[in-house]
Amino acid sequence: MDTTTLKLRGMSCASCAKSIENAILSVPGVNECTVNFGAELATVEYDPAKTNVTVIQQSVDKAGYSAYSLQDENAITQDNDADRTFRLRELRKLQRKLLVGGVISSILFVGGLPMMTGLSLPWIPTWLHNPWLQLVLTTPIQFWSGESFYQGAWKAFKRNTATMDTLVALGTSAAYFYSLFPTFAPSFFRSYGLEPAVYYEISAIVITLILLGKLMESRAKGQTSEAIRKLIGLQAKTARVIRNGKESDIPIQAVEIDDVILVRPGEKIPVDGEVIEGTSTVDEAMVTGESIPVQKQPGDEVVGATINKTGSFKFRAVRVGKDTFLAQIVQLVQQAQGSKAPIQQLADKVTGWFVPTVIAIAITTFVIWFNVMGNLTLALVTTVGVLIIACPCALGLATPTSIMVGTGKGAENGILIKGAESLELAHKIKTIVLDKTGTLTEGKPTVTNFVTVRGTANQNELKLIKLAAALERNSEHPLAEAVVKYAQNQGVELKDALDFEAVAGSGVQGYVADIFVQIGTKRWFEEIGINTNLFQEQKDAWESLGQTVIWIAIDGKVEGLMGIADTLKPTSIEAVRKMQKMGLEVVMLTGDNRPTAEAIASEVGIDRVEAEVRPDQKAAVVKSLQAERVKRKSKIVAMVGDGINDAPALAQADVGMAIGTGTDVAIAASDITLISGDLRSIVTAIELSKATINNIRQNLFFAFFYNVLGIPIAAGILFPIFGWLLNPIIAGAAMAFSSVSVVSNALRLRNFRLKGEG
């Protein structure tokens, strides 16, 4: 079986995603298909002996949509600009339609207030409700702004299905085309003793409000592809290849296995390979998430897209193209995003029965009134009333308004929430997976321990750190930065160093005020004959805590020892305790060695630790946690991380949470961003999720309540008993009131407070 990922275009609702799934699954040879409405991706598993990608794409085209493959090498890069241009063009088009619709709908609404309310409002000119003026104003909204609804309804009709587009098209068309009759033939209505009322404003307002929901949805969906685009942007564009003794810069797509590549200081490593000549330090934060550069020498592995820091070296290309580490990361993010089951909103789930039922009721209403009562006008009025009151204005606003207020409230609390899917899942989370470096910890090396041979008498400690920092400030190594920052915090003044020399992978040396200072590793000191037995116990103790130990020597003798570590964030312990109090299982996931990981975990109170995990394994760990069962249900797992290396795991998790102080790629791959980096925001996000989802459910209840109650009344069910008949104007007012109820209820979220807060 082969697997392909398709980028989709043309979807307007979750029903469209289901239609595409069914179309692809109908292709002989397709074994499995998952369509992600939010990411606009389809992940398809198929038998290459029975079908191919072209046939699958054709099945999508026949369903009324379009698809292109992301599997070909550089497909994402090639289509990046085109996809961005397409999305921006569609967004601007939607914005223009919404602007025009909003202005005209406001005029129509004000003009229609006297008729809708039955009140005398002398401050509103009567000409604002002139049928001919309303016809002129409404027509562009009906057929230009509402064009997408007609197109969606037509697609659904061709597939023998019905969607929300169908109901919007039918309801607004009923109001519009019915209004043409009293506009052109008002005397016909007066002859039957009826007021020739028009309902243009209903059509215009409904279309405008639904477009507002579509705009909000489109903006949320546009974020899903940013992770992929930014990952692609990490790779180098060219490689300096040595062929036949000559150096030449070539595109990385042209690099072949066994090519010898030269990398200079500050350059990105273009592809994966093995060092064959030279030494340097490489920033592998993209791979490991760790901020301290790694020493590289002949025989060591280097990874594409990592950054060379201090020296030049040559390496042999081992993995190129789709086989590189970065390409695998891209693929993992793609697959994880595409495999997420689309979260169907209730409004879309019920369309399968709601829309056909409403249409059937409208037709039945017309037939009964026409055949039983023999009154065409009353038959038309009741039919239009049914379609208008059933028009899903409130239904379309139920989720977006709550999301708008909920996400705004989240932003106030330093939480960026990308859409309804993450909000819907956040309150169901059972397990929180926390990355260590940059998430639980600060992500910056800091001096944590410092001892000297001569103690603190006569300011010996300050004198030694002054000498050490004066030398280290000539180095660009992160450990050197930690030493300099430590000295600056002590308020010491630093002198210039002379004859500075950096010994790759070992340390630094030079003269400060005619004093020979050496700072480096135990191995280096032993190689040059400096005795290191003095601080052996401290070294072993600090290393057991996951600290990096550096030695300081003056004139060839050890004078001090320094432990450097990545310290915990001040709020990490409290955050973990609060999560555990909520009944959440907290897991720490890191590429660090186990002793370091367990030491940190013990400090913050985490019992379950997954250590020594590579980035390409992190997503698998998250997946295994998701497979664990709780009361016969799979766990809902959240991943919290900050680095590029966390991106696949963030995408794989049911809810990905990125630290706002981390990388752009991690943020793009996540569902929720914690702007401040404070892990206590996780608790706030979960509580906000609960409040928002409850609010959405209330809104949906309001929306359906009006329909369930109003449709039978509009159909005339009370007429035989009480002689009551729902006028379409009242139906329109009821529909409008349902929208007001939904919006007003959503605004209550602005009063959200964490439990325990005032």
Image (spheres, rainbow, N blue to C red):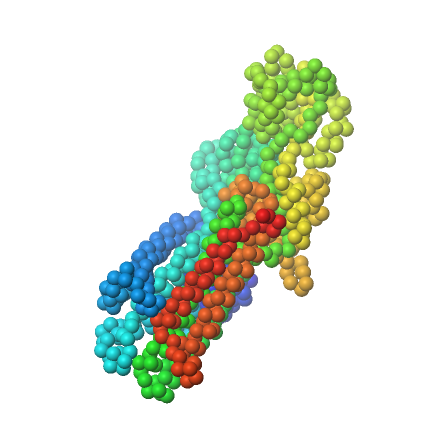
Q: Residue furthest top?
A: 514
Which residue is rendered at x = 24% and y = 66% of the image? 130
> Relative to residue 22, is residue 513 drawn left or right?
right
The picture quadrant where one finds residue 457 is: top right
- Residue 609 locus on image (x, y percent): 69, 47
- Residue 450 locus on image (x, y percent): 69, 25
In this rendering, is residue 390 above or below 745? below
In this rendering, is residue 458 above or below 619? above
Instruction: In this rendered view, identify the residue nearer to me: 135 or 602.
Output: 135
> Relative to residue 317, is residue 190 drawn left or right?
left
Which residue is rendered at x = 37% and y = 51% of the image? 88
- Residue 508 locus on image (x, y percent): 61, 22
Which residue is rendered at x = 74% and y = 23% of the image? 532
Q: Is residue 175 visible?
A: yes
In the picture, the quarter occupied by the N terminus is bottom right
The picture quadrant where one finds residue 717 is: bottom left
Q: Is residue 41 visible?
A: no
Q: How many marks?
A: 0
Which residue is rendered at x = 47% and y = 35% of the image? 240
- Residue 403 locus on image (x, y percent): 48, 56
Instruction: In this rendered view, identify the residue nearer to me: 74 or 550.
Output: 550
Instruction: In this rendered view, identify the residue nearer to me: 31 or 731.
Output: 731
In this rendering, is residue 518 above or below 195? above
